[in-house]
């Protein structure tokens, strides 16, 4: 059994730090009394002034409640439709439209990877054009 930190443990720690450090810094600076984001007002901070201002802002609260209602309705609808589709695919044998139903139920699982792949393709094509225009670099496509 190896002792010490492995590469995967270090990579996990760096990845989690990369994801959560900005969130933690936003939480810390949300208690700042200064109107400037980068300046900490040590004389009057920490404060909950901004949270009290948020709780008295009626349009923001109305928008938040609307978002919660829409999320609850869409989640409920997704659970009902997903459960019914799962029951149909698990309990019934072959039927007309089964392949279409399977495709419709698995498409949301595949779409993030497809969109990420297309985005990376567009990024690399634009980077190639950038380097060709500004630096005169040519890339071998073979």
Image (cartoon, grey):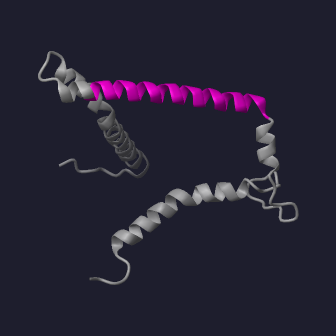
Q: Position of residue 15 (x, y in %)?
A: 45, 62
Q: Position of residue 108 (x, y in %)?
A: 33, 33
The residue located at (39%, 49%) in the rendering is 131
Image quarter in which the N terminus is found:
bottom left
Q: Is residue 133 above or below residue 80?
A: below
Q: Residue furthest front?
A: 91
Please, what is the dominant secondary structure of the magenta stretch?
helix
Q: Nearer the viewer, residue 88 or 41?
A: 88
Membership of 65 in magenta stretch: yes
Left or right: residue 80 compared with residue 21: left
The picture quadrant where one finds residue 110 is top left
Q: Residue furthest left?
A: 94
The residue located at (77%, 46%) in the rendering is 51
Q: Is residue 80 above or below residue 45?
A: above
Q: Is residue 60 above or below residue 14?
A: above
The residue located at (44%, 48%) in the rendering is 134
Q: Nearer the viewer, residue 10 or 102?
A: 102
Left or right: residue 74 compared with residue 67: left
The picture quadrant where one finds residue 11 is bottom left
Q: Is residue 7 above or below residue 35?
A: below
Q: Residue furthest top?
A: 96
Q: Position of residue 74 (x, y in %)?
A: 47, 26
Q: Which residues are magenta?
A: 57-86
The picture quadrant where one finds residue 96 is top left
Q: How many marks?
A: 0
The residue located at (39%, 42%) in the rendering is 126
Membership of 103 in magenta stretch: no
């Amino acid at each position: 059994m190896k002792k010490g930190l492995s590469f995967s443990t270090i990579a996990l720690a760096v990845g989690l730090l990369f994801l959560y450090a900005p969130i933690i810094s936003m939480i810390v600076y949300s208690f700042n009394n200064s109107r400037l984001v980068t300046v900490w007002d040590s004389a009057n901070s920490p404060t909950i002034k901004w949270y009290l201002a948020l709780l008295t802002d009626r349009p923001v609260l109305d928008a938040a409640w609307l978002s919660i209602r829409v999320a609850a309705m869409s989640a409920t609808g997704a659970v009902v439709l997903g459960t019914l589709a799962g029951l149909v695919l698990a309990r019934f044998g072959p039927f007309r439209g089964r392949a279409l139903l399977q495709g419709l139920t698995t498409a949301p699982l595949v779409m993030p990877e497809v969109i990420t792949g297309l985005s990376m393709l567009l990024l690399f094509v634009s980077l190639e054009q950038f380097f060709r225009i500004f630096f005169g670099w040519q890339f071998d496509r073979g």
